Structures are given as C-alpha cells and as structure tokens.
C-alpha cells in the first residue's frame, strides 16, 4: 500500500508542478497575505491545491486532506494527505527556481506529533527533480535510491535553515545563526523546507534545522529524510513539529541538537 500511495503522490505532484510552472511563466501576482505582510499566497497556490485535491479525491475519495490553502477535509479511511501546493512561495514569486509541490500521506490524526507518515513526494518543477519515499521502502530521487551523507564533525557540516515570517522571530533566529556560524562549515537558507529535507536526504546538505514550520512544510520531507537514513528530531525528544525540526545523519543530529539548544534557538515560544 505504501508504494501505491507513494506513486500516486508522485504522479499528482508532477502534474501539479506542471500547472504551477505554467502559471509562473505567465506571471505571478500576490493574491493575499496570511500571517504577516511578507507571508503571501498567490492565485497559483490556490489553483494548484485545487488540482491536487481533485486528483486525490478522484483516486481515494475516503481519504482526508490537510492543505495549506484549503484547510482540512475529513475522511473515513484513517489516511490524510498533507499538501503544500507551492512550498517556497516567495522564491516562486521572485522567479527563483527553488520551490516545490510537497505531498505526504499520513496515518492517524493530522497532527505531526502523533501521525505516522506512509508515503511522500516532493517535486521541483523548475529543475524537474522528484524526490519520493514509501515507509520501509527507502527514499528516491528520480526513481533511484538515495542516502544521507556519511557523518562529519559539526565543524565540517554544511547546514541549512529557514526563518519565520514574524519580523521579531526572524531577529531572534538571526542571533542564533550568528552563534552557530562559527561552529559549522557554512550555512544555506534556500527558502523551501521540503527541498531542504530532500537535499539532506540525497547528500547535498549535512544537516538541517528550523522552527515555526507548519505541518505541510515538513510532512513529506521528513519521511524522505528518514527513509534516506536521517534521524529527524523535534523538541525534547518529541516528533518534529512547529517547535523544532532537526535532521541529519544520526551521529550528527544529536550533536546539532545540542549546539542549536546552546545557541539559544529554543529560548522562546513559537
């Protein structure tokens, strides 16, 4: 079942990505702001999610859907599709070719602290790359198996992170980054959490951490990273959620969690 769900998620993500890419070529306008003036949604976000929802319900009418733009639609099967139609919307708006359609399938309540991810797909329309995973079956890029990089010392780790939409929170996160930078090889902030986790999964990054993520930001990427051999941690040993998401080779993840905590990343509520 997990492989069938993975393949369906992949096919839908690729189709939705083609729509998003067409709309990007035609020109993108901001449709609305959400949590802050810089947290935006485009008409393409909404149209792309509508397509994804239609395809899911055509194939699996009893499943639930949790989407960034459309909220939660209940189901009766015990499975929920967690959808970010365009992860990295600001990149998308500016024409930066680093955005993705992110789709995961989870068992249980649509809560990252308790759900069990079954399948996932992350597709970057700009590059044509598709990452996917099925529980217990490993992670793939373009249908080929992928794995995290061998562990390195923290001082040699290429680290990725992201920042919140709240100006106050971003300021605090910047202070944390200033403390972490001298401890690592370098830091990247590409702007798309699902791709950051997927890049970790295929060895393009050594480690990743972020706070303030929404469920649809990390649902697919976390499963892909885990199936590629990463340890993914949340705050105080919980599952990854809005409070914290850390991912790396298991030996490095524990070291990074300590460094992030000592740098003050968890010193305020989100």
Image: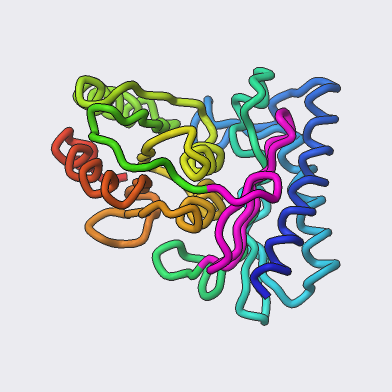
Residue drawn at the location 85% of the way across and 22% of the way down? 26
Would residue 146 be found to the left or right of residue 85 on screen? Answer: left
User: Is 23 rendered above or below residue 261?
Assistant: above
How many numbered marks are there? 0
Residue ranking furthest to the left: 262
- The span shown in magenta is 117-146
Q: Is residue 157 magenta?
A: no
Q: Main secondary structure of the magenta part?
A: strand
Instruction: In this rendered view, identify the residue nearer to me: 121 or 141.
Output: 141
Image coords of residue 268 (percent x, y): 22, 41
Q: Is residue 140 magenta?
A: yes
Image coords of residue 203 (percent x, y): 47, 38
Quarter of the picture holding the N terminus: bottom right
Instruction: In this rendered view, identify the residue nearer to me: 73 or 101.
Output: 101
Q: Quadrant of residue 194?
A: top right
Residue drawn at the location 35% of the way across and 47% of the way down? 249
Would residue 54 be found to the left or right of residue 138 on screen? Answer: right
Quarter of the picture holding the C terminus: top left
Q: Is residue 253 visible?
A: yes
């Amino acid at each position: 079942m997990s492989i069938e769900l993975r393949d369906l998620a992949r096919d839908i993500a690729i189709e939705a990505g083609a729509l998003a890419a067409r709309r990007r070529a035609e020109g993108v306008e901001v449709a609305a702001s959400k949590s802050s003036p810089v947290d935006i949604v485009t008409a393409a976000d909404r149209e792309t999610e509508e397509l994804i929802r239609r395809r899911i319900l055509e194939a699996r009418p009893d499943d639930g859907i949790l989407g960034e733009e459309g909220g939660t639609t209940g189901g009766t099967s015990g499975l929920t599709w967690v959808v970010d139609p365009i992860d990295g919307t600001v990149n998308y708006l500016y024409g930066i070719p680093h955005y993705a359609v992110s789709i995961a399938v989870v068992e249980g309540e649509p809560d990252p602290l308790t759900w069990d991810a079954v399948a996932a797909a992350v597709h970057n329309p700009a590059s044509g790359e598709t990452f996917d995973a099925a529980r217990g079956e490993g992670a793939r890029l373009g249908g080929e198996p992928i794995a995290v990089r061998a562990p390195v010392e923290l001082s040699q780790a290429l680290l990725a992170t992201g920042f919140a939409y709240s100006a106050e929170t971003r300021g605090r996160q910047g202070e944390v980054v200033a403390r972490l930078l001298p401890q690592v090889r370098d830091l990247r902030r590409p702007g798309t959490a699902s791709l950051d986790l997927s890049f970790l999964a295929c060895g393009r990054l050594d480690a990743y951490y972020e706070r303030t993520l929404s469920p649809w930001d990390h649902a697919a990427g976390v499963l892909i990273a885990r199936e590629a051999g990463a340890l993914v941690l949340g705050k105080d040993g919980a599952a990854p959620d809005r409070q914290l998401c850390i991912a790396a080779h298991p030996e490095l993840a524990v070291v990074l969690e300590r460094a992030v905590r000592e740098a003050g990343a968890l010193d305020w509520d989100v």
